Structures are given as structure tokens and as C-alpha cells.
Image: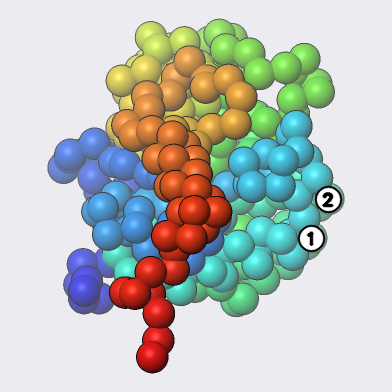
Amino acid sequence: MSTDGDRITVPRFVAQKASGPKITMVTAYDHTTAGLVDAAGVEGILVGDSLGMVVQGHPTTLPVTLDQMIYHAEMVGRAARRALVVVDLPFPLGHLGVPEAVRAAGRVLKETRCQAVKVEGGADQADVICALVRAGIPVMAHCGLRPQNVHQLGGYRVQRDRETLLADAKEVERAGAFSVVLECIAADLAAEVTASLAIPTIGIGAGAGCDGQVLVFHDLVGLTSGRTPRHVKVYADLKETIVGAVTRFRDEVRAGVFPGPDQTFR
């Protein structure tokens, strides 16, 4: 059991850029998964709006609502004892004006036990990030591939616009973001962005030059439906394990083997 002194706070998360080791983050959308991820000792847990695709089965993250994010984040927040828990602000809350963004992010912190929000965007979201930080709400920014802009970007593509990416990263840092996710960016460019910032960068599909890495839990443990993204490394094959376990249960029930004497009350 972790103590309060073990808790990863925002300042401790930021300081790890300079002190090392590399920062690790994994997504979680429920109490059980969050407890497992937290026990593994990662620094951060992301309650991502990726739950729209991973849990709800949508083709994009766009249908996810604030109430759904809070529902999942509350479960995760109760399970996490050590990791810093960051919650995505879902589409389109970052674009409805500063008061709406502050109201939404305030709900996240008030109604869950999570410590920060993540806002997709660069220079275009600087005013929102600045207002959230002034309100005492820690913000993780998100540059590069922005899934909430998937229709405008024309799909999930590697981002290579050096000038825009450097400018976006600098602007979110100036606005007060404590870190920034760099998604699907050419590795040399992500390393350049990382070197230009005082705040940590968390890569996903952005090479090893970032200050840390984040992966979707379901991708990491082999539960992905459909194609596994190129940037993912699969560390376990739980899909085969789970299907095999359920198949054995089915066969034993049909054969009259389960429940046996050890599973029967007398």
C-alpha cells in the first residue's frame, strides 16, 4: 500500500524530466484496470477519451461526453494510490470558450479523485490552458496528431510540420501546461521539441527522444480489436488467454465437470 509520500504530484512529475528516469503512463477506464496499472508503478494514468473507441466501440473519440469521462474517471480515481491521474476534456469543450472549459474541468476535479486534465491543442488552446491553470487546474497539453481533429486532419497521420509543432509546444508551455503529449510525430522532430521545452513531453508514436511514453492499456496487453497500431508494442496476449479461459468454462459446463465438488456447497 502506497503512502501519501509516494504519490506522484504534478511538481514531482515535472521534475522527473531533469532527474529521470523516463516517465511512464498507461490508460485506464475502470477501477480494476486502474488498480493493476497503479500497482505496476507507472507515474501517470490517463483516463483518455480513447475510451470511445476502446470501450464503447466508436470509430473516433468524438462521441464521448463529459458525463461519461467523469463516470470513468471517478472509478479510476478511487483505485489509484500512487500515479498522477489525468483526464481528457472531450470534444468540443476546449472550443466553447474559457468559462465552459473551466466549468467542465472543474467538474472533473470536483467529482473525481483525479489531479489534472488533458486538453488537445497547441497555440489555438493557449487561452483555455492559461485560464485553467489560473483556476488551479493542472493541464497536460496534447500536440501533433489530435484525434479530436481527425476529420480536419484527414485521418490518423504522422505529423511532420516542424514550424507548427515547435510553435504549438512553446505556446502550451508559456500558457502554463505542466507537460505535453506528442502523438504520431516524426521521431527527430519530437526529440527537437522535447529539447526545446522545460516541461516533460510524453510520446505516443513519437520515438524514444521524448521524456516519457504513454500507451493504451488494451494495446499494451493484446486486447486491441482489429489492427494494432505500428507505434504499439504488445507485452502480453490477454485476448488469447481470455478466449481460452472462457472456452474451457463452456466445455466444462457442457460436460458436467463444472461446478465440481470444490465449487459446490453442502
Which kind of residue does numbered mark 1 sit on? Glu
> Gap in Å between the C-alphas at discs 2 and 1?
6 Å
Label 2 sits on residue? 96
Q: Nearer the viewer, residue 192 or 262?
A: 262
Mark 2 secondary-structure assignment: loop
Q: Which of 18 and 153 is in front in this view?
A: 153
Q: Position of residue 64 (x, y in %)?
A: 75, 49
Q: Where is residue 104 in the image (x, y as percent from the top left)?
A: 72, 63
Q: State left or right for residue 202 relative to residue 76.
A: left
- x 22%, y 71%: residue: 2
Which kind of residue does numbered mark 2 sit on? Leu
Give the quadrant of the C terminus. bottom left
Q: Where is residue 20 in the image (x, y as percent from the top left)?
A: 17, 40
Q: Position of residue 198 (x, y in %)?
A: 34, 36
Colouring = rainbow
- x 46%, y 73%: residue: 78
- x 60%, y 31%: residue: 225
Mark 1 secondary-structure assignment: helix
Where 5 falls versus 248 (above or below)?
below
- x 37%, y 24%: residue: 233
Label 1 sits on residue? 100
Marks 1 and 2: in contact by CB < 8 Å? Answer: yes
Q: Can residue 231 be seen in this view?
A: yes
- Dividing the picture into quarters, in which one does residue 23 lie? top left
Q: State left or right for residue 213 relative to residue 111.
A: left
Q: Can residue 173 be seen in this view?
A: no
> Given the current orientation, which residue lies at the most extreme bottom position?
266
Give the quadrant of the N terminus. bottom left
Q: How many labels does the image show?
A: 2
Q: Nearer the viewer, residue 218 or 168?
A: 218
